[in-house]
Image (tube, rainbow, N blue to C red):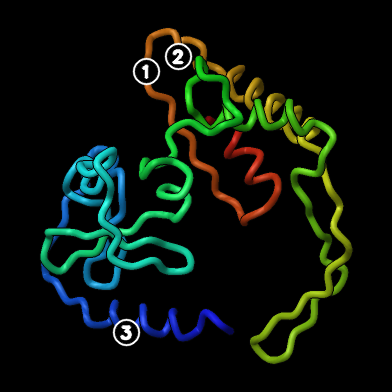
């Protein structure tokens, strides 16, 4: 509750922003710019990183963000406080769990995390024990969490990935350098998350 006044102040400030500018997203923005109450990538490659090393100019420190000075009209630049407090203003590029010679990809991050935290709980699911309806509203009574460890989830992801790679034509596509696209159509679930990891 102590944060409500700050959140209300930020909401009022955001409500005052009005811009009709259309922003074209760059290849990969290094910061986020707020325009017309929505979050969009900046049109500059590194809008706030120009001052990195020479010191960023902090306009306001909020609970969950730091607002940086910006010379663009009707825009605001924000960074996570960790970037300024612990990373010299730079955005996180390579997660600390990865060795320096490893590519910063989601599969590598998950594999190294699974090796480091093998026996720890990774993904929990709850069964729906009872489903009741009151008019158009639906209510569930759920059971306790059942957890899978990191190594069990990694084994499932690896098995699903091997199965996908064994599909007819996949090996030839990969060897030819053709793009392989996967679409997962399902309700959000542990199986969906495992499938999303497997297609990477």
Q: Is residue 148 left or right of residue 188?
A: right
What whole-number distance in Å separates the C-alpha atoms at marks 2 and 3? 51 Å
Of residues 180 and 85, the one drawn nearer to the viewer in this rendering: 85
- The image position of residue 128, as x and y in percent, is 82, 66
Q: Residue at x 62, y 55 (%)?
A: 188
Helix, strand or loop at mark 2: helix
Q: Which mark is residue 12?
A: 3
Q: Determine crowd level at label 1: few under 14, some 14-19, many 20+ residues with C-alpha closer than 10 A.
A: few
Mark 2 vs mark 3: give the one in front.
Answer: 3
Q: Mark 2 sits on what residue? A: 174
Residue nearer the viewer, 110 or 140 = 110
How far apart, in angstroms, are the residues tagged by discs 2 and 1?
A: 6 Å
Label 2 environment density (alpha carbons within 10 Å; few <14, some 14–19, many ≥20): few
Left or right of 131, for residue 29: left
Left or right side of 44 for 188: right
Q: Which residue is mark 1?
A: 178
Could you tell me residue 85's position as x and y percent? 46, 49
**107 above or below 32?**
above
């Amino acid at each position: 509750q102590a944060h409500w006044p700050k959140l209300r102040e930020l909401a009022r400030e955001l409500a005052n922003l009005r811009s009709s500018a259309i922003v074209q997203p760059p290849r990969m923005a290094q910061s986020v710019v707020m325009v017309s109450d929505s979050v969009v990538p900046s049109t500059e490659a590194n809008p706030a990183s120009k001052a990195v090393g020479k010191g960023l100019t902090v306009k306001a420190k909020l609970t969950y963000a730091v607002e940086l000075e910006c010379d663009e009209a009707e825009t605001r630049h924000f960074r996570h406080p960790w970037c300024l407090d612990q990373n010299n203003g730079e955005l996180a590029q390579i997660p600390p769990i990865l060795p320096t010679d490893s590519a910063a990809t989601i599969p590598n991050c998950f594999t190294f995390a699974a090796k480091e935290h093998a026996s720890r709980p990774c993904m929990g699911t709850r069964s729906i024990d009872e489903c009741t309806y009151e008019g158009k509203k639906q209510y569930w009574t759920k059971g306790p969490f059942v957890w899978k460890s990191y190594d069990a989830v990694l084994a499932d992801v690896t098995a699903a990935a091997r199965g996908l790679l064994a599909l007819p034509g996949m090996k030839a596509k990969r060897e030819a350098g053709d793009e392989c696209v996967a679409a997962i159509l399902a309700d959000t679930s542990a199986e969906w998350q495992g499938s999303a990891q497997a297609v990477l």
